[in-house]
Image (tube, helix red, strand yellow):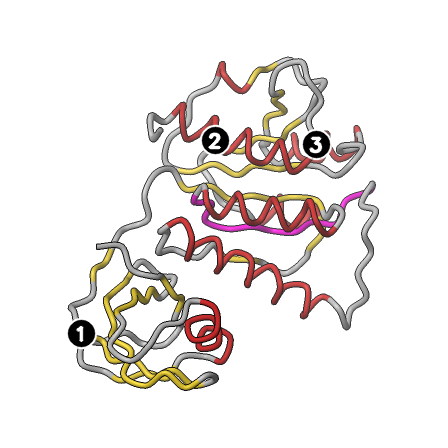
Amino acid sequence: MNYTRIYCGQNLEIGKVLILIQNSSKHLVNVLRKKEGSLIELFDGKGSSCTAEIISSQKKRVKVKLVEELVFQDRKGIKISLGQSLIKTEPFSFSIQKATELGVASISPLYTERTVIKLKSNSTKSRKARWQSIATHACQQCGENWLPEINEIQRLEDWAQAVKAKHKIVLYPNAETKLSSLTFDDSVAIAVGPEGDFTDSEINLLTEKDFLPVKLGERVLRADTAVISVVSAIRAMCEEF
């Protein structure tokens, strides 16, 4: 049976009684009208999930008891690390949502030469919290038990230097290599640029870090569209779809 899914970052253990956070409690009581005795599914964002029963349904303080053994699922498919230049708020949030639904393992917001969005140091923490919330809700909706790692905002060169993957690609409309001509396995890092794309110097930098420039056909895609397209294409090429 499909139950309402709620993220719970606490330790999940059968028979344990947990108090859900305020946002989850309000959603269950005010929006979904859940009552005492209702069953829900909790997941920890690290591969585990279990069934829990609501034993107290106060508006801001829902208590649940874990009533079934945990089920653990390994992360499925090729491991994908996404490095995306910061773009406008709504498209970037959309990218995070869809990348999460498609099972991306990590998302790294990047400062690039053509990044338009400039965040003040005191706003980066709240912005990251919002991105994490978007990813959490996406997992709740799609049935994914693994939350992606949302990394701190960093410079393109720092991410390119640090990211570990068997394959590394950068989306570049002027590339000679088509994505469809490649094969992937194990892990892949994908660099996606901002509005106006990466500069030539950034493409050179990424190439020096073993990133292969590739293109997605002849159309120039929006950054958020490119994220969905490249991740979906790689999953299909790996016969996961």
- Distance from disc 2 to disc 3, alpha carbons, whole Å, reads 15 Å
Instruction: Find out whether residue 137 is within the magenta segment.
Output: no
- Distance from disc 1 to disc 3, alpha carbons, whole Å, reads 46 Å
Instruction: Find out whether residue 112 is within the magenta segment.
Output: yes
Name the N-terminal-most of marks 1 and 3. Answer: 1
Neighbor class of circle 3 (other Cα within 10 Å; few <14, some 14-19, many 20+) is: some
Along the horizontal axis of the image, is 10 left or right of 225? left
Along the horizontal axis of the image, is 100 left or right of 9? right
Residue at left offset 50%, top offset 16%: 180
* Vertical placement of residue 207 versus 74, above or below: above
Along the horizontal axis of the image, is 193 left or right of 133? right
Image location of residue 109, percent across then percent down: 65, 51
Neighbor class of circle 1 (other Cα within 10 Å; few <14, some 14-19, many 20+) is: some
Q: Which residue is mark 1?
A: 67
Q: Which residue is mark 3?
A: 222
Image location of residue 198, percent across then percent down: 76, 33
Residue at left offset 18%, top offset 76%: 14
- Distance from disc 1 to disc 2, alpha carbons, whole Å, reads 36 Å
Amino acid on which disc 1 is placed = Val
Residue at left offset 38%, top offset 71%: 8
Q: Mark 2 touching mark 3, by CB under 8 A?
A: no
Q: Which residue is mark 2?
A: 232
Question: Which residue is nearer to you in this view: 103 or 33?
Answer: 33
Read off the magenta span: 103-113
Amino acid on which disc 2 is placed = Ser
Q: Mark 1 touching mark 3, by CB under 8 A?
A: no
